[in-house]
Amino acid sequence: MGDLEIRAAVAEDVPAVVGMLADDPLGAQRESPNDLSPYLAALERLAADPNQRLVVAVREGRVVGSMQLTIVPGLSRRGATRSIVEAVRVHADERGSGLGTRFMEWAIEESRRESCQLVQLTSDVTRTDAHRFYERLGFTASHVGFKLQL
């Protein structure tokens, strides 16, 4: 894994990131790889927010993973800061290589560096393989998540 670089995403990475977002049954229904303009606008908003980290994993010059890490200051838990991991994707060619573990270890370490007391994430109920993966890393399914589509 020494040849892996984790760095901030840039505009040139967007096609590869969107390709990974669209490369599963759920993403295929909600992503639009043919029109990158909303993704590029979102990247600008993310880059301007100091509490956001949109990162890519790069191996041999190729984007092979992506995730968003959000740092959230709060009042609950005695003023605890938490991080939220979103949109974790690993290129199909890299699944099973240990990249996902390395990526999540990066997110946990970055959260510690930001003095977070909690790392949290949500995962679609249909992603049972992902649930097993997160549990192996020590995450617990302690809450029920709700979403309201607007």
Image (tube, rainbow, N blue to C red):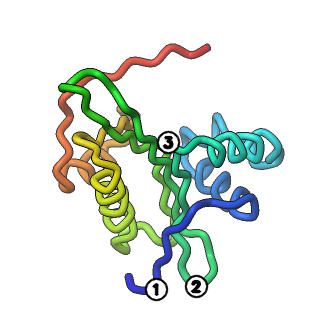
Dot 1 amino acid type:
Asp
Most foreground residue, 45 or 144: 45
Could you tell me how far apart the alpha carbons at marks 1 and 3 are, in whole angstroms?
A: 27 Å
Q: Label for residue 51? A: 3
- Measured as percent of width and height from the top left, residue 145 is found at 34, 22
Percent coordinates x, y for residue 51 in the rendering:
49, 42
Tag 1, which secondary structure? loop
Camera-side mark, 2 or 3: 3
Residue visible at 36% across and 35% down in the picture: 122
Q: The disc labelled 2 sits on which kind of residue? A: Glu
**How far is disc 2 from disc 3 in space, using C-alphas?**
29 Å
Looking at the image, which is closer to me, 56 or 93? 56
Q: Position of residue 15 (x, y in %)?
A: 73, 58
SS at circle 3 = loop
Is residue 131 placed above or below 81 in the rendered structure?
below
Q: CA distance from mark 1 to mark 2?
A: 7 Å
**Among the two numbered marks 1 and 3 on one chain, the one whose residue lies closer to the N terminus:** 1
Residue drawn at (54%, 79%) of the image: 59
Residue 35 or residue 11, whichever sits in front: 11
Give percent across and percent down for residue 25.
55, 42
The secondary element bearing badge 2 is classed as loop
Residues at circles 1 and 2 in contact by the CB criterion of under 8 Å: yes
The residue carrying mark 2 is 60
